[in-house]
Image (cartoon, rainbow, N blue to C red):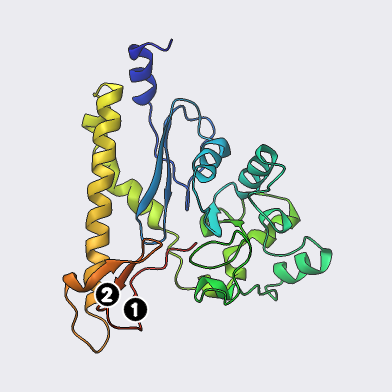
Amino acid sequence: MVSEDRLVDELMKQKFEYFIITVFQPFVIGGWSVILCPHGVVYSLKFNLRAESPRDYADLLLSWMHMPNVSAYDFARGLATHANLRSPTSLPFQPHEGRLAASTQENITAAQQKKLSVPLPWLTEKLQRPDEDGHPVTGSSDHYVLYDRFHEANTNDPKEVLRRLNLVPELQGSFNSQVAEQLFSSMQKNNYFLNNLAPSTHIFLMRNLVHHKNSNTNAKLLEQQLQRGHETHQVQDIFLNSVGQAVLGKYEVKEKYFFSNCNL
């Protein structure tokens, strides 16, 4: 059995680790593995006692009922390989092992010359004929894992150029590559007291901090959405649809306006 003293010692060596955008530090012991959307809302959080690795993010993603269609990570190839080996009968990342196109020499050359474009229209509009086992928001069953813009040069494998975000037109200008760094900056100030807590208290308080941060982020996004459009809306006009999205408008209005489409 792991003693409380050992847990305290491991947690005091914490480092911030993220999913959507992350800094890979394989020699750091312990830390947090976090999945968040491009708006900065944290969806999953794991406390690590070992060095961070793709295994931790695979644990989180495989626990979801619906995996995101597009994920960004600083060691994308490692995450795709690990997750697909863990579930060989139903590959989590496919097609093309989570790459945006088949790893042919033609595609690799075109991507290197910035002549390759891979549209994913279901990121902005749900497929009219959803795939079998497709995501409830996009309708697509494709799952890609890409490199964030800060770590595209992390690999020397030519095939990994097919994991770059700039190949997808729908992600240009809408994917906030700094959202994880912003989370790191906002949470770092709490280290001075989190590092002195017992493990159970540390986890409880960390979850509360993340909850309040999510609530504040959602409130700001809702306020921004309420100020858009030609009609005046109130907070009371917002409700959740069948997949948990905030919807603007009254119940009798047939055309609804979606507040957030975190379908990545």
Secondary structure, mark 1, is strand
Q: Position of residue 61 (x, y in %)?
A: 52, 45
Question: For the residues marked 2 and 1, what is the alpha-carbon distance in whole angstroms?
Answer: 10 Å
The answer to which image quadrant residue 88 occupies is top right
Q: Quadrant of the N terminus?
A: top left
Q: Position of residue 6 (x, y in %)?
A: 38, 14
Q: How many numbered callouts? A: 2
Residue drawn at x 47%, y 48% as measured from the top left = 19
Residue drawn at x 58%, y 62% as measured from the top left = 134
Q: Nearer the viewer, residue 158 or 47?
A: 47
Disc nearest the viewer among 2 and 1: 1
Q: Is residue 256 left or right of residue 139?
A: left
The answer to which image quadrant residue 207 occupies is top left
User: How busy is the neighbourhood of tag 2: few (under 14 within 10 Å), some, or many (20 plus)?
Assistant: some
Q: Position of residue 145 (x, y in %)?
A: 60, 55
Vertical order, 86 against 264 (above or below):
above
Which label sits on residue 257?
1
Q: Earlier in the sequence, mark 2 or mark 1?
A: 2
Residue behind mark 2: 225
Secondary structure, mark 2, is helix
